[in-house]
Amino acid sequence: MKKLISLLIFVGLAINVSGQEEPKNLKEAFKADWLIGTWETKNDDGQVTSQTFGWKIQDVLMFKESKGSDGKVGSFAIISLDTDEGKVLMHYHSSRGRTSIEEVQFEGNKVIRTANWKSKKLSKEQIESRVESIVEGRLASGAVQEEGVAELKQNVRNFLNNRKTSGTNKTTYEKQGADKMVATSARKDESGQFVAIRRRGRGGSGPVTYTRKKE
């Protein structure tokens, strides 16, 4: 009799666990309403960039849009719920040809994006065009003087020639108040460990602080 009771209890627990309801739509799965809105940050050169999260189709489909200091869209992503897997996915595209499918997870006040990305190798013409664009921007902002242009060009050229065309990155957004969040980015190295990503114009690889833009 005791064995029968134990068996019934075990079966009941198994049914209860397996019967947990999966989220019906993205609204139920996206456990970070605080992220909705436009967030801005300023780099060491005084340039302001932004990220915006919002609804494309209420409760069903979201978007993420990033803009550079020139106000132009640099990347765009669609966020949806994979109902078969019960995962929140982000399909990301950048103006520079990088694409990725990312899984979005939630841990308390943190939103974690893990991306397997890929991009096309740049041609020599594309590299030189990118070099000129970056140098022009740094000259305009005063971040570099004429005597430093040759060195900057070579550094950027080396970076673009040697950059990877695929990899795994992780970005974590952490809420630190109603109108403040901190983003940290890392990439998976050859040993399989995540290491901080260096960001141009920020003096290193530390976290990036965003403040909510007031409408």
Image (tube, rainbow, N blue to C red):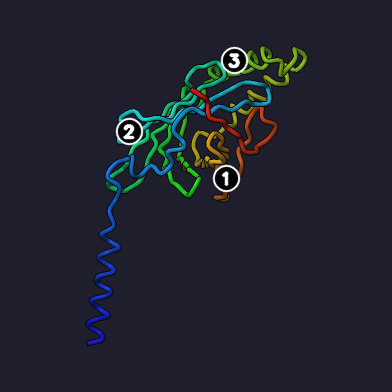
Mark yes or no: residue 72 visible.
yes
Residue wearing tag 2: 61
Q: In the image, which is nearer the foreground, mark 2 or mark 3?
A: 2
Please state which of residues 133 and 67 is positioned toward the viewer in this rendering: 67
- Kind of residue indicated by mark 3: Ser
Residue at image coords 45%, 40%: 116
Classify mark 3: helix, strand or loop: helix
In front here: 179 or 92? 179
Q: Position of residue 149 (x, y in %)?
A: 72, 16
The quarter of the picture where the N terminus appears is: bottom left
Report, in whole angstroms, how far the alpha carbon at label 2 lies from the one at label 3.
34 Å
Mark 2 or mark 3, which has the lower sequence index? 2
Please, is residue 15 above or below residue 57 in the view? Answer: below
Give me the C-alpha separation between circle 1 and circle 3: 29 Å
Tag 2, which secondary structure?
strand
- Is residue 185 in view? no
Instruction: Find disc 3 in the rendering and name its residue.
Output: 133
Q: Earlier in the sequence, mark 1 or mark 3?
A: 3
Count of all numbered marks drawn on residues in the image = 3
Q: Is residue 29 left or right of residue 192?
A: left
Which mark is nearer the camera, 1 or 2?
2
- Give residue 90's quadrant in the image: top left
Q: Give the farthest residue toward the bottom.
A: 1
Which residue is drawn at the image coordinates 57% and 50% (left, top)?
193
* Mark 3 burial class by Cα count in 10 Å: few <14, some 14-19, many 20+: few
The crowding category of the residue bearing disc 1, from other C-alpha atoms within 10 Å (few below 14, some 14 to 19, many at least 20), is few
The image shows residue 153, relative to residue 187, as above or below, that is above
Residue 121 point in image, percent of width and height: 50, 27
Question: Which residue lies under the disc numbered 1?
Answer: 189
Residues packed near mark 2 inside 10 Å, few (<14), some (14 to 19) or many (20 plus) = some
State the image coordinates of residue 182 (x, y, percent, origin top left). 58, 38
Query: What type is the residue that disc 2 sits on?
Result: Leu
